[in-house]
């Protein structure tokens, strides 16, 4: 009888143990470190977009730098061209004959060296006159230099064709007054008018007729 009870008890224990084994949780085949594929793809997309943005920003910055450099170079070239043109124009003005017979012609001679006057008046062998002056016979002009002989400070003409703003040698003094305004001085047959750049025009008159017989442009 005891054997039968023991055998039954053993059978019940075996059944109970088998039931517990069948109820165990299934093994998790996923590694705890694994992430869903969608997360990896999103990260890759983000990195790619970030790289593209960085490249675009670099390209834009590079384009801006290049444009700035080009503009600066263009400005420098333009300035250099302007300076060169200005220098060439100045050199050209000082190295060619003056053909106009007007006030500007005579005032331009002030400040020139003897060599420059020779070129401007197209006469290479002027005659020497009193007080170291130079007489250019063809244009009817005489010039005097500063005491050190550095440049012209006085120009004379009695050429009737010389045009002084519409007034000419041989005209009444009033014509010069109409052209240049009231003289700053008028005595002993000489009327002096102020010009620009520290220059003055002196009209020498015949005291009997009051007509102008010669004109001086002088450096004050």
Image (cartoon, rainbow, N blue to C red):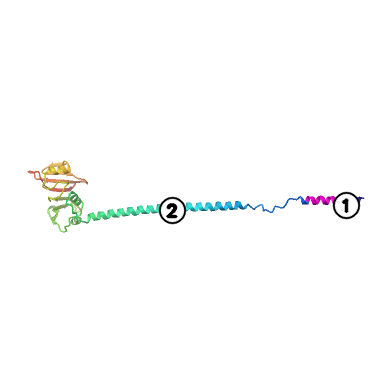
Going by the picture, which residue comes out furthest to the left? 208
Q: Position of residue 24 (x, y in %)?
A: 75, 50
Q: Is 201 one of the magenta-colored residues? A: no
Mark 2 secondary-structure assignment: helix
Between residues 111 and 140, which one lies in front from this camera angle? Answer: 140
The image quarter in which residue 210 lies: top left
List x then y, in percent, for residue 165: 17, 46
The Cα atoms of the two marked residues, 1 and 2, are separated by: 94 Å
Q: Residue at x 28, y 54 (%)?
A: 85
Residue sitting at 39 percent across and 54 percent down? 70
x, y percent for residue 57: 48, 51
Q: Is residue 143 left or right of residue 21?
A: left
Query: Which residue is tagged 2?
Result: 63
Residue nearer the viewer, 168 or 191: 168
Q: Nearer the viewer, mark 1 or mark 2?
A: 1
Q: Residues within 10 Å of mark 2 (few under 14, many from 20)?
A: few
Tag on residue 7?
1
Identify the element where label 1 is drawn: helix
Q: Residue 194, which numbered label?
A: none
Residues shaded magenta: 7-20
Q: In the rendering, at what x and y percent does residue 152 appear?
A: 18, 52
Q: Quadrant of residue 77?
A: bottom left
Q: Residue at x 22, y 55 (%)?
A: 94
Foreground pick, 14 / 62: 14
Where, by quadrant of the figure, is residue 128 drawn? Answer: bottom left
Around disc 1, counting alpha carbons within 10 Å, would you say few (fewer than 14), some (14 to 19), or many (20 or more)? Answer: few
Horizontal arrangement in the rendering, residue 15 relative to residue 131 (left or right): right
Task: Choose the circle earlier in sequence order: 1 or 2.
Answer: 1
- Helix, strand or loop: magenta stretch: helix
């Amino acid at each position: 009888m005891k054997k039968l009870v023991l055998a039954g008890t053993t059978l019940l224990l075996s059944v109970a143990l088998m039931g517990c084994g069948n109820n165990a949780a299934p093994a998790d085949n996923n590694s705890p470190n694994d992430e869903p594929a969608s997360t990896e793809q999103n990260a890759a997309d983000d990195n790619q977009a970030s790289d593209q943005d960085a490249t675009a920003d670099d390209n834009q910055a590079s384009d801006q730098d290049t444009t700035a450099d080009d503009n600066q170079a263009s400005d420098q070239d333009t300035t250099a061209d302007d300076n060169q043109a200005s220098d060439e124009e100045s050199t050209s003005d000082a190295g060619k004959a003056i053909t106009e017979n007007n006030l500007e012609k005579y005032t331009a001679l002030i400040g020139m060296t003897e060599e420059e006057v020779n070129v401007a008046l197209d006469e290479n062998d002027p005659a020497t006159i009193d007080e170291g002056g130079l007489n250019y016979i063809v244009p009817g002009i005489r010039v005097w230099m500063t005491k050190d002989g550095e440049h012209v400070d006085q120009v004379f003409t009695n050429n009737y064709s010389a045009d002084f703003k519409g007034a000419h040698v041989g005209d009444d003094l009033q014509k010069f007054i109409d052209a240049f305004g009231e003289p700053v001085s008028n005595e002993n047959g000489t009327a002096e008018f102020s010009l620009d750049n520290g220059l003055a025009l002196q009209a020498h008159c015949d005291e009997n007729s009051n007509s102008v017989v010669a004109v001086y442009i002088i450096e004050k």
